[in-house]
Amino acid sequence: MARTKSSQRWLKEHFDDEYVKRAQREGYRSRAVYKLDEIQRKDRMIKPGMAIVDLGAAPGGWSQYASGLVGRKGRVVAMDILPMDPLPGVVFVQGDFHEDAVLEQMLEVLAGQETDLVLSDIAPNISGVDAVDQPRAMYLAELAVDFADRVLRPQGDLLLKVFQGEGFDALLKDLRGRYQKVVMRKPRASRARSREVYALARGRKI
């Protein structure tokens, strides 16, 4: 089947991408790791010994990176609706985290351990229709915020991918009600035309 011009353009852009090349060279599973790396270098939210949950983890770049920073005394639990190849030091739960059975499985894996940091790089399958994509993206972000409420310890942090557009301001207001400090980050590895930004919410309120 012939590729469309847009898919050919995407493939060329992807394989010419400096972060794709760097990820291949440095042994990371995805270019997205450099978004997390830039935020980490600025904000230092990942520390040795932490317990971290990574939502929307596949193919595993963020979990791979976080696991290296938390070390043997730390813990990374990854979740995605898609399969993910095993990673040393990472426990993977496959499923949709807003389904009760999957959430219960996740809580069983955590075994009562409170989480220090929730990472969410979740995004919907993009249709290209903004009126469809934006509500989907906001819905997933809201689910991640609610999930963080279930598992985060007091003063814990949440790093959340969000898309600028309808519902963005309301979500930001909600986060500021739940956390002591919320800052926005747009890493260099995030493609310029993308409306994605990352909300770093620090210090979960009781």
Image: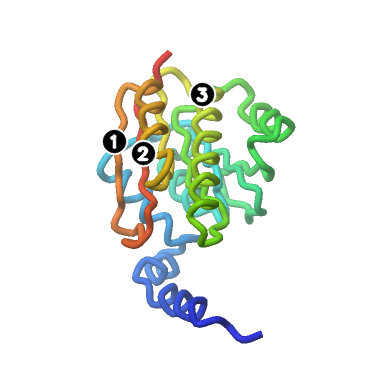
Counting residues from the start of the chain, the first of labels 1 and 3 encountered is 3
* Scheme of image coloration: rainbow
Q: Quadrant of the C terminus?
A: top left
Q: Amino acid at mark 3?
A: Asp
Q: Position of residue 13 (x, y in %)?
A: 41, 75
In the picture, the disc for residue 149 is 3
Q: Are marks 1 and 2 in contact (CB under 8 Å)?
A: yes
* Left or right for 166, reference 149: left
Q: Amino acid at mark 1?
A: Val
Q: Are marks 2 and 3 in contact (CB under 8 Å)?
A: no
Counting residues from the start of the chain, the first of labels 1 and 2 encountered is 1
Cα separation between marks 2 and 3: 15 Å
Q: Nearer the viewer, residue 58 or 8?
A: 8
Cα separation between marks 1 and 2: 6 Å
Q: Residue at x 42, y 61 (%)?
A: 31
Q: Which residue is mark 2?
A: 199
Q: Position of residue 89 (x, y in %)?
A: 56, 43
In the picture, the disc for residue 183 is 1
Q: Quadrant of the N terminus?
A: bottom right
SS state under label 3: helix
Q: Nearer the viewer, residue 192 or 91?
A: 192
